[in-house]
Amino acid sequence: MSGSLLLSVLTGGDAATRLSPRGWEQLLREARTPQLTARIGQQAKDQGWYDRVPVRPRRHFEAMHRACVSQQHMVRWELGQIERALAPLDAPVVLLKGAAYLMAGLPVADGRIFSDVDIMVPRDRLQQAEAALIARGWISNVHGYDRQYYERWAHELPPLQHVQRASVIDLHHTITPPVSRTPVDATKLFARARPLDGSKFFFILAPADMLLHSAVHLMQEGEFERGLRDLVDLDALFRDFGRNSGFWPTLLERASEHRLGRPLYYAVQQVRSLLGTPMPRDFLAAIDRSRPAFITRRAMGGLLRTGIVGATARGATWRGDVARGLLYIRGHYMRMPLRLLIPHLIRKSGSHLAFLGRGRSVQSIPAGGNAPGAI
Amino acid sequence: MILSEVPETELARRIGAEGLILECGPFVVRVSSPIAAIPQGLGLLYADYPVLDNDAFADIHIRLVRHRRLGPLGAPQVVFDFDGERPFSPLPLAHAWPCFEWALNWSIASSANYYLVLHAAVLERGGQALIMPGPPGSGKSTLCAALTARDWRLLSDELTLIDMECRGIVPVPRPISLKNQSIQIIRSYIPDGVLSRTVHYTAKGSVAHLKPQSSDVRRAGDNAKPGWIVFPTYVAGAAARLAPRSRADTVLELGNNSFNYHIQGQLGFETVADIVEASRCYDLEYGSLDDAIAAFERVAGTRS
């Protein structure tokens, strides 16, 4: 199956060192879209075969490593700015996803490229938090209907971008849309959130909640081109948290409390079948009780696999496009009841159904421009 | 093997099928396209570039295809396909050649984080590099083209690559992009220069590309050491004026003129500081090409 080279390197130790020059080229192409280049470089270092990577491919790993280090440096700095902006609020501010992985020093952060900072505050402090960030220069370019969409139906506000530094903040009040099939009560998340080590200000989610957020993200956000990266995140989180035997029962308990058993089931299936993530037998037996009916299970398993694996470079096939299109629709369906979804899709039919035309949008940057690199 | 040794039919076949693998300085580029302008342009401007076997490792993939939709007035369009992504809007098919050059610029600039990349033309004489940063309109490319005809070796007309380990300046010689009036100026300044057909009404106006000297392409593996940094400004009717420039200010300005200074951290800062330390720095104001070239001869006399 296409995309298997990236998967075999992610799962297969130093098999990469036996690649031909074309093999290296193929691997780097496959790793680009899901942004796993730096991750593989990190894996090579951890497993002790980085020195055996030929010089030309190694330059790419080195370049992505530098980009990754500088991004992490910038995110740390931006978090300092966010802390200054939100400190007067006197509300708990929880770091989510990449920022949480990085600041908590989790292994999943190694070689992980990200730039947007996701944070969560209690819903009744959301407006205040946004106003405080706006006062410090983060603004939103989303207005009118789109703004209303976020405010009424989403679990976050429209992205805020800093006017000078272009850093982006996603301000959440929970981790799934309140109108979705799987609304998550944020008070339960805040109740188990813990202070971030070394910070007097930020919180992070409890390990089980952090993992469930990652699983929900894979299933709902509709970014299946980068789905493999979400799976790599999940794999690292499972391996890291799973070393503590108390984690597995807590995960099951939290999944049922938040009613996120189904997304967790799908995440477990995919991460095990594609990345071979080890899990205790009794956990697997328990999670199996969240499985859907046979037909749904087969259909979703196939779609996810085709959508995720088929998205890697050159493996981009019509099957992958169709699978991602269907998953995208499903993601919407899960996010909103039909009575809201249908009017929304009609309203957005121009842009939201664009996946039919191959999904990825074309920037309207005119050819030329001033920078030489800017075609 | 160099590109001119590949028979024309074989060249078109490879580009139309599995792709042609070219060596552009430190980058290996796989080019494929069903559009006839691509083998034609490569045959004209890249004749001296090394061609590698199909099983070589390529850093960069340039694929130009016809866009599915027609443009205004039903005109066919060309689009840069980047492994299934289309980072830029389609252009008229007649712009296919400049589109190739822009796609390659973009790909090099975005895959060159192994190097510190400055937005500057760079030439070499006697092993020393002349770095010439300059905003559009400063005449950087025109000066660069003229200097290549006056015993300066072309390293690049837009991207100065610095190897941060050895502080060497790495050549990536490419055809020089000329715009609008510069095209005629260079035609008369370098009568035997080879230029691609001028393409009008692009986002940059009229553009043509000047073929680099064969010897400059052959010497793409020879790095240069820092020598001079000159910031040119074109002032209509002005006499040439060469003034020394503060090193501290030059460090700041090079940082501002860099594509990836911000990601290189401390090593990037130290590299820029070392390059400036080892260079003589000037501002050059000029009103005519001949004056400017004479000023560069004076600059070259000031070896450090």
Image (cartoon, coloured by chain):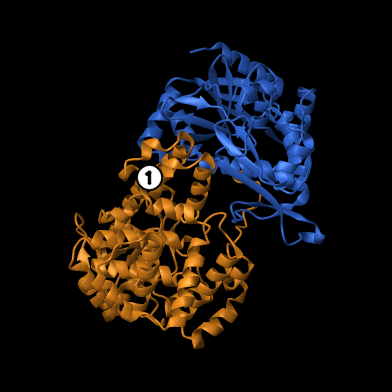
Colour that chain B carries in the picture: blue
- In the figure, is residue B194 to the left or right of B87? right
x, y (%) of residue A236? Answer: 31, 58
**Label 1 Cα neighbours within 10 Å, binned few <14 / some 14-19 / many ≥20:** some
> Which of these two is toward me, A329 or A317?
A317
- Give me the residue at 79% from left, 31% from top: B184
Does any portion of residue B5 appear in the rendered image? Answer: yes
x, y (%) of residue A289? Answer: 31, 81
x, y (%) of residue B231? Answer: 56, 28
Local secondary structure at mark 1: helix
Residue A26 position (above or below residue A349): above
- Give me the residue at 31% from left, 51% from top: A76
Query: In which image quadrant can residue B179 be found?
Result: top right
- In the figure, is residue B283 to the left or right of A202? right
Residue B53 position (above or below residue A240): above
Name the subunit of mark 1.
A
